[in-house]
Image: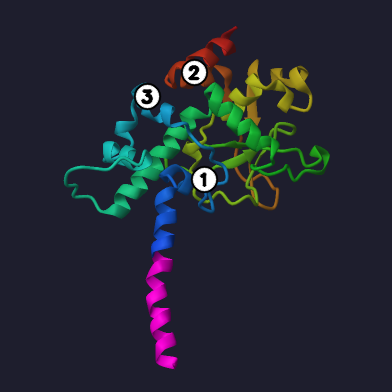
Amino acid sequence: MADQRDQDVIKQEPMVEESESEDREEVSWIEWWLTRSGNDFLCEVSESFIQDNFNLTGLQNEVRHMRRALDIILDIEFDGSDESSEDELEKEAQKLYGLIHARFIVSPRGLARMVEKYNNGDFGQCPRVMCERINMLPVGMSDNYGKGMAKSFCPNCKDIYNTKIKNDLVDGSFIGTSFPHVALLTFPELSPAGAGNFDKLSATTMNTYSVSNSGAVDTSRVMHSCSTVCSVLQNRGNAGRQLTRTLTL
């Protein structure tokens, strides 16, 4: 009897593995990537945005094997040989998605998705007592890949913090330096003082600081002018050009 039970267990094991494999196949690459722990700052980029070559302009200089990486993101079967390893291609796909993400989130649809995450508190709350745990916006300290991880910007005190939100897979370039500007220009109600406090961001400069986990300022201020935002948006698709026109009105 014991031998029979052992045989039954052995027969059932492949069925479990097959079921798990089927579940993975049913999930798109984008859905899988967004559910990875450490990607909490990212939203879902529309496939139509990814498929528009205009939105990919210049990224071929940033991502190796870009066409193959794009196929991975869009779940397109690749016909032909590729000398690159699967791990290398996967990393390039993750990088490409992040760089596209930075362009998508300054489009109307991308802004809407990020504001929804903001309302849910997905980017953390400001630790300062006077800010009363207001939700923060994500920001990158550089638009260049590999220069640091994404951080959180408080629309009230306008400081930048490392948060407890797990975002260790989100490079700062996946958000970009201009996102808080664009979000607050488009949705001034995100700032507690509303439009009355907006000139501090757009008419002059936005003074921000890199703050350590303890809350202490540990690097020099980063100056972002509105004109810089405009020049960045000029290279970010049709939606970006619409937002640029809004900034210059």
Magenta stretch encompasses residue 15: yes
Q: Earlier in the sequence, mark 2 or mark 1?
A: 1
Q: Nearer the viewer, residue 71 or 208?
A: 71
Which amino acid is tagged 3?
A: Asp
User: In the image, which disc is placed on residue 149?
Assistant: 1
> Which of the 4 image quarters holds residue 225?
top right
Residue bearing the label numbered 2: 239
Query: Which residue sits furthest top?
Result: 249
Q: Nearer the viewer, residue 182 or 225?
A: 182
Secondary structure mostly seen in magenta is helix
The mark closer to the camera, 2 or 1, is: 2
Which amino acid is tagged 1?
A: Met
Q: Measuring 43% from the left and 61% from the top, which residue is drawn there?
A: 19
Range covered by the magenta-colored residues: 1-17
Please provide percent x and percent y for residue 39. Answer: 53, 47
Q: Measuring 52% from the left and 35% from the top, which residue is drawn there?
A: 175
Please provide percent x and percent y for residue 45. Answer: 48, 34
Please provide percent x and percent y for residue 145. Answer: 42, 40
Q: Assign the C terminus to one quadrant of the image.
A: top right
Q: Nearer the viewer, residue 199 or 180?
A: 180
Q: Secondary structure at mark 2?
A: helix
Q: Secondary structure at mark 1?
A: loop
